[in-house]
Image: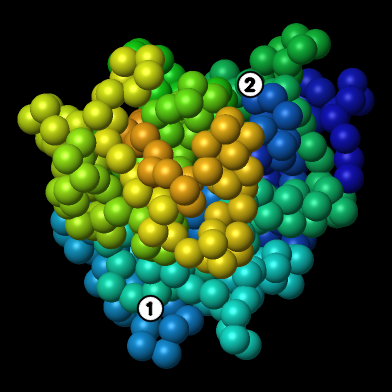
Amino acid sequence: MLRYDRLVRNGASFDVLVVGSGAAGLAAAVSAERAGARVALATKTTVQACNSAKAQGGIQAAFGDDDSPDIHAEDVMRSSHDTADPALVEVLTGDARSAIQWLEELGVAFTRQNGGYRLARCGGATRQRLLQVGDRTGHAITKALRDTYEAGDGAELPHHVLRTLTPSDGGWRTSFETKDGAADIEAGTVVLAAGGRCFAEAETRGVLSTNHPNATGEVTQIALAAGAESRDLDALQYHPNGGAWPSTMQGYSIPETTRAYGAVLLNAAGEEFTDSLGARDTVSQAIFDEVDAGRGVVTEDGRPAVWLDTTRITPGDAEISLPYMLRRYRSAGIDPLSEPIYTYPVLHYQNGGLVIDEQAGTSLEGVYACGEITGGTHGRNRMMGNSLLECVVFGRRAGRAAAEAARG
C-alpha cells in the first residue's frame, strides 16, 4: 500500500482515482487495481469513516430455491413504484450471486444455517433473500474490502476533501483540500463513490439521521457543476425504524430484520396499524400518519414514536441475527426481548443521484459513479439490503470500466 505523503501531492498522477471509501469506493478500487490500473483512493477523513460500515440489516441476493434474479427485479420495480431504471435493476439482481461469491472470496463470512445461507425476508420482498453477517453486515463487507485494497499496491489519500473536478488532456484534474494545503491529482479516469447528503439534510430539517457526519453531498454538487446529469435528487428516504428512546439510541437504525423475525409495529392501544414488512416508504408514512392521528406514543423526552414489539422475536433468532442491537439496548438498560421499544422514522438515504449506465458510466466521459451518489437503481424508493448490493455490483463494474478506459 502506497500511503499518502509529501512525495505524492501536487501533480501526482494515477490511472484511476476513486473518491469515497465506503463499500462502493472500496469495491471500485479493488476491482480497478485487479484490472491492472494504478489506483488512488481519496476520502475526506479516514478510510474507515463511511455509512457502509454502519449498515446492519444485510445484503440481498436470490439464493432461495423459490427465488430468482427476475423475482428480485420484480420486487425492486414494485417497491420503487416503477420509477427504477429496469436496465440497472437487471444488472443489480443479475450480478447479485456473483457479488456474494466475490465477497466470500475476500473473507466475508455470511451467517449460515442448515447447510446454506440464513436468509430473511425484508420489507417489500416476496421471498427470503437477505444474507447477513449477524447485524454487522456492512462492517464485515467494508473491512474485507478495505483489507484487500490495503494489501495491494494502491495509494490511500486520507483527509482529502474534493473541491473541483475539471477535464484535462490526460483525463481529469482534481483539486483537494488537505491538512497540508491544496493538492492537485491527475487521473485518466475518476470513480465518484462519495455517498449521499442525508446527514447535512437532517441538520437542515432539524430531524434525526442514521448517517455518518461525512454524508454531506458536496461531491454530487461538484459533479453537477462539471456537467453530470442527475435524477430524483429530491427523493430522500426515511428509515422506518429509527431509535427514538433512550437518548443514546436516537438516530440509530434499528435493523429491519427485527420485523423479518417477528417484530410488529403497534400504536398506543397496542394495535397493529400497517404491514410491518411493507416497503420502506409505505411503512414510514404509516407511522407518520398514526402519530399525526393522535394514536402514537411519546418518549420520555417528548419525541413522537410508536412501539416496535420486539418481544415476539425468539431468543434464538435474536442471538444469531441481532446481537449488536441487543447489546446496545441492554447496555442502556432495556431488553428488547422483554419489552417493546420506541421507534420513529429517521432520515436515511439519498435515493436519487448521478445518472449512470450499466457499466457505471456517468454522462461525463471518463467519470464513473457507484453507490448512493447515483440514481436510477432504486428509483424513488429503495428496498433494504439493496444498498450494499448496489455498492458491490456497480463498484466492481465501475472499477473495471474505469481501468479499461484509462488504459485505452
Q: Is residue 113 left or right of residue 389?
A: right
**Residue furthest left in the image:** 293
| Quadrant housing the N terminus | top right
Expressed as whole percent of the image width and height from the top left, the position of residue 228 reads 38, 36
Disc 1 element = helix
- Gap in Å between the C-alphas at discs 1 and 2? 38 Å
Residue at 57 percent of width and 19 percent of height: 163
Q: Is 27 located above or below residue 167 in the figure? A: below
Q: Is residue 188 visible?
A: no
Q: Quadrant of residue 160?
A: top right
Q: Is residue 289 left or right of residue 280?
A: left
Which residue is the site of mark 2? 161
Which of the two marks, 1 or 2, is nearer to us in this view? 1
Out of 55 and 233, give the one closest to the viewer: 55
Residue at 41 percent of width and 51 percent of height: 310
Disc 2 element = strand
Q: Is 258 located above or below residue 165 in the figure? A: below
Residue at 28 percent of width and 59 percent of height: 277
Out of 172 and 299, give the one closest to the viewer: 299
Q: Amino acid at mark 1?
A: Pro
Q: Is 214 located above or below residue 348 in the figure? A: above
Residue at 55 percent of width and 55 percent of height: 322
Which residue is the site of mark 1? 69
